[in-house]
Amino acid sequence: MNWDWEKLQEKRQRQSGPLPGPDLGDLNEKVKQFKQMNLPGWRVILLAALLLWLGSGIYLVQPDEVGVVQRFGAYDRTTEPGPHYRLPFPFESVQTPQVTKIQRLEVGFRGSSSFASGSGNQVRLVPEESLMLTGDENIVDVQFIVQYLIENAQDYLFNVANQDKTVKDAAEAAMREVIGYNKIDSALTDDKLTIQNDTRDLLQKILDSYNSGIRIVAVQLQDVHPPRQVIDAFKDVASAKEDKSRFINEAEAYENDLIPRTRGEAAAILNQAQAYKESKILQAKGDSDRFLFVLEEYRKAQDITKKRIYLETMEEILSRPEVEKIIISNESMQRVFPYLPLQRSGKATVNGQGKEGGAN
Amino acid sequence: MKTIQFTIGGVVIAVFLLLQCLFVVDQTERAIVLQLGKPVGNADYGPGLHFKLPFIQNVIFFDARVLEYDAPAAEILTQDKKNMVVDNYSRWKIVNPLLFYRTVRNVQGGLSRIDDIVYSQMREALGRYTLTEIVAVERSTIMDEVTAKANVLLGEYGINIIDVRIKRTDLPQENQMAIYGRMQAERERQAKQYRSEGREEATKITTLADKQRAILLADARRAAEGARGEGEAGATAIYAQALSQDPDFYEFVRTMDAYKKTMKEQTQFVLTPQSEFFKYLQ
């Protein structure tokens, strides 16, 4: 039974309009007429029709809706979700807008994949909506969505004609105004969040000025990019930025390679010098120790030790096979010496008197 | 049966008369009543059930909601002699239905009046600003200005302009191309700058590293020479300390050592028997 009433109510609602109710007096009179006729069949039908008519006043408000009741066209009351009763057709009518459902509006493109169920993956661009002038006279391609819901059903239904178009026009105007305040670089990069918020606030302000009863939930930038004609140049800037950091990284890599290596080399130089120093000193110590030991014994027998060392030295030198030895007498020495082939070798040593000098 | 028929007939007539006396104004509307074409009273009728005289009075309804006016995009000339395509829209309301009916009759008439006034006001206002001002800084001022002026002019038609908004401000096709060219050049400049900044930075880093290397090595060499000097000084001191105990003996021993070291290959000895070594040979 409930279902019938609902359907009936829906039907009536469709028919309902600002027309004055013609049936009221008509029906009551007819009821009297048919009562007088005293026909039980007619009565039953009439009673049923009356009940049906009264029953058409029952309506359900779904959890996501509110009921807005008009009595003779004028707003009368707003009802919460649940079953309710209103006077039947000519007296009262009801509308049930969905107030919790977030509605979505696309600007600059149509048919995004996120809401279209299944296959609807094609995004159609609308460049005349999305191309905007920025404050520094550049052109930027902005696609965004607006999410809104009905905050005040009464205002929404009665104050503004063509609500969706109103939101769309206002959204476009607001976004273009906000983009106009911004420069292209901020629109493309850092200030997206600010742009979203500014646009939302401005759009809300515009819609409030119409008393539209609409609350903007969010303005979301979908895609902000430079126009197709210049996108390559913009991409090149991005890769130039990459190049810049690459150059720097390469240089840092060079530095990171070179400096530790150099520190190693420096340490090597120092170590070698230290080694030289230590070995020089130790060598000196060794030499002097050796000298001092020998000196101690030498002092015990000076002459014989000296002689022994001299003879040992001469023996060692003269026993070397590569050393040439020429022995001539003192007298002939005076005569021969100038003719000796001294030039044969680079080094020639004249020995003789010198030995005595050394030995003495 | 006759009485019943009469009664039915009477009822139908009564209902018809009643309907002629009643009218319902919807929440979204306002209405005025005309008596033989002439408006009755000075007031209009708000939402609800109202009465009127049958037959001689009829009702005209007006939409009381915020209505739309969307102007076609038009090319305008800015103060700095630039062409610009401006697409604006307006939201308006019939505030005085009686006046509205008298002056423009219906929404269609109202729209054409708005079109005339808003368009000319818009053109006039935009002509006083430069392109940058229109796009960026003065946009809302211009819109407020046009709204205010249009309101003054449209007040006498019973129309209230809630706002005039510039929806799109675009450039004509040929100017767009120029802008694209400029944007492209601008980006190329940036790209070049980034790259050469990168090279600058890189060169700084590498040469700084080279410099550090040179300094590190030089410093190390300096320290190394110092250490060598210390070593030699230490050695000299040690030698001096030890050898000074008997310089003659040192001279002798050292000379002997030197003989051993130097007289090796390609050495000729010319010896006389008078020498110390050969004294037993004689």
Image (cartoon, coloured by chain):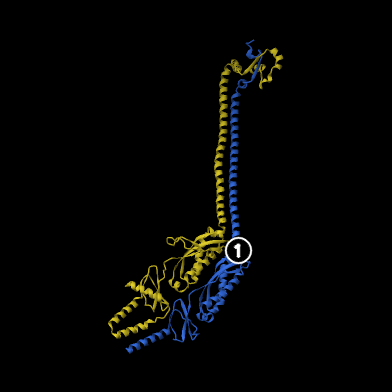
Chain colours: A yellow, B blue
In the displayed structure, B184 sits above or below A15; it is above
Where in the figure is residue A327, as x and y percent of width and height?
A: 65, 14
Where in the figure is residue B193, as x and y percent of width and height?
A: 60, 53
Check the image and name the residue furthest to the bottom.
Answer: B2
Which one is nearer the viewer's eye here, A251 or B233?
A251
For the question of whether residue A153 can be seen, the reply is yes
In the displayed structure, B86 sits above or below A44; it is above
Q: Mark 1: give few (<14), some (14-19) or many (20+) Cα within 10 Å.
A: few
Q: In terms of secondary structure, where does tag 1 sit?
A: helix
For the question of whether residue A359 can be seen, the reply is no
Quarter assignment of residue A260: top right
| Residue depicted at x 47% and y 70% | A163
Q: Which residue is mark 1?
A: B174
A289 with respect to B275 (left or right): left
Task: Kindly identify the amino acid type of the residue bearing the numbered disc 1.
Answer: Glu
| Residue depicted at x 47% and y 72% | A162
| Residue depicted at x 59% and y 71% | B123
Where in the figure is residue A174, as x and y percent of width and height?
A: 52, 66
Please give the chain letter of the residue carrying mark 1: B
